[in-house]
Image (tube, rainbow, N blue to C red):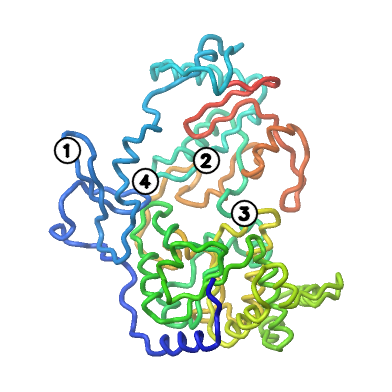
């Protein structure tokens, strides 16, 4: 772990002041064919690639655009196509195929046998209709969750949900695993889902931000893929940020490849895992103690701050959330926490946070607290200030294009494009949070609370998960 010192911070600030103007962030998207090299030009979630084919077999893949930071995933084409884990043909468990009404054998031990596509279609259709007619559409869970495929047609989740809508309905999922907690809380806090919104653009950050904080994110890893096909402009942004000489602070229990990428140009603080809120509270308390919080901004643009400050100062529970209190929880020295408060409040600061920090019990508090701290700094809305939750994925921060986007097939009959916004897919007769699938299976018909509403788990008899068909009976689940 690297301790931030005043001398080290001032040195970084002077470097930023004399930094050269940054170059274009977007890799050359119109590279001449002669410079790209030979191969079949294609694109996937890891970006445009040139594929080398010999005797009808893919033997190599590489990037097709000029890149400063190589994307290692672009060389994995052959490994993905020819992996031994890939299922090439329809396979059915032998004990189930012999008698679908009363399957024999044991899942996990029974052998699988290959069947024709026609036989597979027939088996799926017959069991699907039997369960649907006997138990209703709610008994079919088709909330099939998975990464999207590139293109306007090939996303299995969307096609499955469209098919199930045509068949009469299904039980689906609410939210996603990526940002399940954050996307529920942020509309209440900011009026927007935030995690999938347009970020303050990369050029604005490079021009106006003095301090960039990478809180619980590893963009040099996660920017290798995107929702559809990436041009890796996000990787280029972090390359430019490294060259800029700006103060970059990483707060992460792990020494990630992003920290290694920045080398000695980053200040790394490693709190104990899952103590982000305590550390944020300690910073916030220091701001209040030193009168560095922006009272005018809080009075004009926020509601509820008085209640938060009362909790921060221990007026509710008798526990003042001081830097010393935070140090005991996080393992980060109190002086470090206090210095962060000074740095953030004295400079134009962009707080960039990842999604991983909210994937835990009470995870919504992480993003909520980051937004609260940004409001206390009073820099939300200022060029290069505030916060952002998508800089680490799908080139968040890349300036929005004005060009048209080819719409994709929708999950709902007669619906609009579903090119994005999986969390907003509707049309199911019943939906429950995607991460509560085990709870739903174990407690059919049980009521539960979600986002201020009382809901009821469906009684699921069949699960259709992407290309995997799972049939459940009321007693012994079978596949």
**Which tag, 4 or 1, sits closer to the chain's start?**
1
Q: Which image quarter: residue 282?
A: bottom right
The residue labelled by disc 2 is: 412
Task: Give the CA distance from mark 1 to mark 3.
Answer: 44 Å
Whether residue 251 sits left or right of residue 232 in the image: it is right
Instruction: Say whether marks 4 and 3 touch (CB < 8 Å).
Output: no
Task: Give the CA distance from mark 4 to mark 1.
Answer: 26 Å
Task: Give the CA distance from mark 2 to mark 1.
Answer: 41 Å
**Which tag, 1 or 3, sits closer to the chain's start?**
1
Percent x, y of residue 240: 36, 74
The residue labelled by disc 1 is: 54
Mark 2, mark 4: which one is toward the viewer?
4
The residue labelled by disc 4 is: 151
Q: Residues within 10 Å of mark 4 (few under 14, many from 20)?
A: some
Callout 3: SS: loop
Whether residue 192 sits left or right of residue 203 in the image: it is right
Instruction: Say whether marks 1 and 3 touch (CB < 8 Å).
Output: no
Callout 2: SS: loop
**Which tag, 2 or 4, sits closer to the chain's start?**
4
Which residue is painted at 68% across and 86% down in the image?
296
Percent x, y of residue 100: 56, 13
Mark 4, mark 1: which one is toward the viewer?
1
The residue labelled by disc 3 is: 359
Numbered label attached to residue 311: none
Mark 2, mark 1: which one is toward the viewer?
1
Q: Which image quarter: residue 64?
A: bottom left
Which residue is painted at 58% across and 55% down in the image?
179
**Which tag, 4 or 3, sits closer to the chain's start?**
4
Vertical order, 404 against 15 (above or below): above
Q: Residues within 10 Å of mark 2 (few under 14, many from 20)?
A: many
Percent x, y of residue 396: 45, 64
């Amino acid at each position: 772990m690297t301790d931030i010192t005043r001398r080290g911070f001032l040195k970084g600030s002077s470097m930023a002041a004399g930094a050269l103007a940054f170059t274009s962030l977007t890799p050359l998207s119109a590279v001449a064919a002669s410079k790209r090299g030979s191969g079949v030009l294609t694109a996937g979630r890891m970006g445009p690639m040139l594929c080398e084919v010999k005797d009808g077999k893919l033997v190599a893949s590489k990037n097709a655009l000029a890149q400063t930071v190589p994307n290692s995933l672009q060389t994995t084409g052959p490994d993905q196509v020819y992996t031994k884990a890939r299922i090439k043909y329809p396979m059915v468990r032998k004990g189930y195929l012999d008698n679908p009404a009363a399957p024999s054998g044991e899942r996990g031990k029974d052998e699988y046998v290959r069947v024709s596509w026609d036989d597979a279609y027939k088996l799926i259709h017959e069991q699907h209709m039997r369960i649907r007619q006997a138990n209703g559409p709610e008994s079919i869970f088709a909330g099939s969750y998975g990464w999207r495929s590139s293109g306007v047609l090939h996303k299995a989740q969307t096609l499955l949900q469209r098919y199930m809508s045509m068949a009469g309905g299904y039980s689906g999922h609410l939210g996603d695993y990526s940002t399940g907690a954050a996307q529920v809380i942020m509309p209440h806090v900011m009026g927007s889902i935030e995690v999938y919104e347009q970020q303050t653009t990369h050029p604005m950050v490079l021009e106006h931000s003095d301090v960039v904080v990478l809180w619980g994110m590893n963009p040099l890893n996660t920017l290798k893929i995107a929702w559809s096909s990436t041009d890796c402009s996000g990787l280029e942004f972090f390359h430019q940020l490294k060259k800029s000489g700006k103060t970059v602070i990483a707060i992460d229990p792990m020494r990630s490849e992003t920290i290694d990428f920045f080398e000695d140009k980053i200040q790394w603080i490693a709190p104990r895992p899952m103590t982000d809120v305590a550390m944020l509270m300690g910073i916030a308390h220091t701001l209040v103690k030193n009168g560095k919080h922006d009272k005018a901004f809080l009075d004009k643009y926020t509601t509820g701050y008085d209640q938060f400050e009362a909790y921060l100062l221990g007026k509710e529970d008798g526990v003042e959330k001081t830097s010393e209190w935070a140090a005991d929880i996080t393992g980060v020295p109190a002086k470090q926490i206090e210095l962060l408060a000074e740095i953030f409040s004295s400079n134009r600061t962009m707080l960039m946070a990842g999604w991983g920090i909210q994937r835990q019990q009470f995870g919504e508090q992480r993003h909520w607290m980051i937004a609260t701290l940004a409001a206390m700094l009073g820099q939300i809305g200022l060029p290069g200030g505030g916060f952002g939750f998508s800089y680490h994925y799908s080139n968040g921060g890349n300036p929005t294009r004005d060009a048209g986007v080819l719409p994709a097939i929708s999950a709902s009959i007669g619906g609009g494009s579903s090119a994005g916004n999986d969390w907003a897919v509707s049309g199911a007769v019943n939906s429950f949070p995607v991460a509560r699938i085990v709870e739903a299976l174990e407690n059919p018909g049980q009521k539960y609370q979600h986002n201020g509403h009382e809901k009821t788990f469906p009684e699921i008899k069949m699960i259709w998960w992407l290309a995997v068909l799972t049939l459940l009976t009321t007693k012994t689940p079978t596949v």
